Image (cartoon, rainbow, N blue to C red):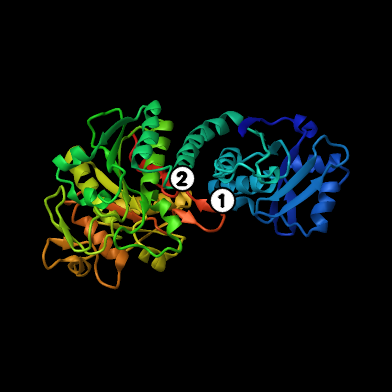
Amino acid sequence: MKINIKELSNKYLNTEGAVVVFAFNVEDGYTFQKPALLFDEKTSGALSNAANSSEFKGKFGQIVELLAPNGVAASRIILIGLGEMDALNPLTSEQVGGKVINKLMYSGEKSITIVDGVIAAHAAFGIRLRSYKFDKYYTTEKNSKKNSIATVTFLTVGADVSNRAFSDLDKIADGVIMARDLVSEPGNILYPESYAEQIKELKNLGIEIEILNEDAMEELGMESILGVGQGSSSETLIVIMKWMGSKNKKVQPLALVGKGVTFDTGGISLKPGPGMGDMKFDMGGSAAVVGAMKAIAGRKAKANVIGIVGLVENMPSGTAQRPGDVVSSMSGQTIEVLNTDAEGRLVLADCLWYCQEKYNPKFMIDLATLTGAIMVALGQEYAGIFSNDDELCEQLIAAGKTVDEPVWRMPIGEAYDKQIDSDIADMKNIGGKYAGSITAAQFLQRFVNGVPWVHIDIAGTAWKQNTSSIAEKGATGYGVRLLDQLIRDNYED
């Protein structure tokens, strides 16, 4: 699907295909934008008659459809309410784009012309995100389930400005879509080796790629991550992505770290069968990091950013890690593994330590589908954040509000930390019955070594069972926009 943004002229009255126009909500009902008014005049009041008969008030998201009206070339006119004029903003504009494509993508129409004066760039972004569908494995899909739209054209005032804005947003959409693709892939297709091959494609954007294999990790003492993967026939890998976009190549980099468990059976602590197929998305944190790196490099962000993902498969077998095993870590700290299904923190422990020792970052942010407990606390609306740095938290909260990827700060502290003390090692990998997401964060903090750090638990937000205004049911790509906005707002030259 191709998206164009062109300068507005009255030629749109002769446009074929579906045409979308808008109205605002006002105190006594609605008011057409000028393009809608001109269409109403050309159709002898057909648009206003349709609006009035359906009790259209111009409220946000209200839709009136007029099929094959006389006097115009369009096959249909779609009128959409934008709500109150003062309430329109980039996020609502994205939602409008999502509503447009959701209404028309299975309509059989080939083209959409959207005539507007204010929302083109962000509405186009919303269209890209909402039109995404992971359908590569369908072989007999009916045409009624395929997106028929080939082109979307925005006609707007100041098209040059909108095109410049959309250029960056388009690159961010590329990152979100890559993250969604990665999370959606089944475990027999996406495993550590094949995942690493996909990441290598980012070299085309100027990202430097380095891969640590198991031999390299053994030399570094990374028993923690290696233990997770020892029951799998796939090789455990750590992939490092480096984008040096700052004018000063020596300035401290920003570090993004992701959990990449490509399939999580729970290991010897085997998960229940129902729902286990969903565990293909236990690499959602790593997908967010990879997608963010694609977005950052795609728009040529003026910042130095390191992305590190630990790629591993957690399987039960004769060589798998056992509950009760004690392993060391790159930090030298020892871990009693009481539950092999609490494996994500073992992956991140070595990745975080390697990150700080190798790159001396300004901060580290890790993302992981780490605990079901965070969903008990926050559902699927917010990701939980845990941190040793107030300023970084505030920046993340603000970025989340800007892009509608909200986060909620959760507590950490000494009382929780004591719950992961072990009787026979430096720590154990699970706490007690309560506060499971907090004790998981406390575990990670023991490998941060005082570096400014935020842990983001995205177990509830990486994959959703319901559609939203900009996403189909399934992988959301959560975290890509959040990380990109954080860096854009605070850390670019």
- Amino acid tagged 1: Glu
Which comes sooner in the sequence, label 2 or label 1? 2
Q: State whether residue 489 is above or below residue 349.
A: above
- Residue 486 in sight in this render: no
Q: Position of residue 82 (x, y in %)?
A: 65, 50
- Rendered position, 345 above or below 216: below
Residue situated in front as seen by the camera: 136 or 379 = 136
Which quarter shows the N terminus?
A: top right
Q: Secondary structure at mark 1?
A: loop
- Pick the front one: 199 or 338: 338
**Quadrant of the image occupied by residue 277:** bottom left
Quadrant including the C terminus? top left
Q: Nearer the viewer, mark 2 or mark 1?
A: 2
Residue 185 has which mark? 2
Taking the view exactly as shown, the residue that stands out farthest to the front is 318
The number of callouts visible is 2
Query: Would you say 241 lies left or right of 111 here?
Result: left
Q: Which mark is residue 349?
A: none
Distance between the alpha carbons at the discs numbered 2 and 1: 15 Å
Residue 289 in picture, x, y percent from top left: 36, 43
In the image, residue 367 lies at what x, y percent?
A: 34, 51
Q: Which residue is mark 1?
A: 472
Q: Secondary structure at mark 2?
A: loop
- Identity of the residue furthest to the bottom in this view: 433
Residue under the point 80% across and 40% down: 39
- Tell me the kind of residue under disc 2: Glu
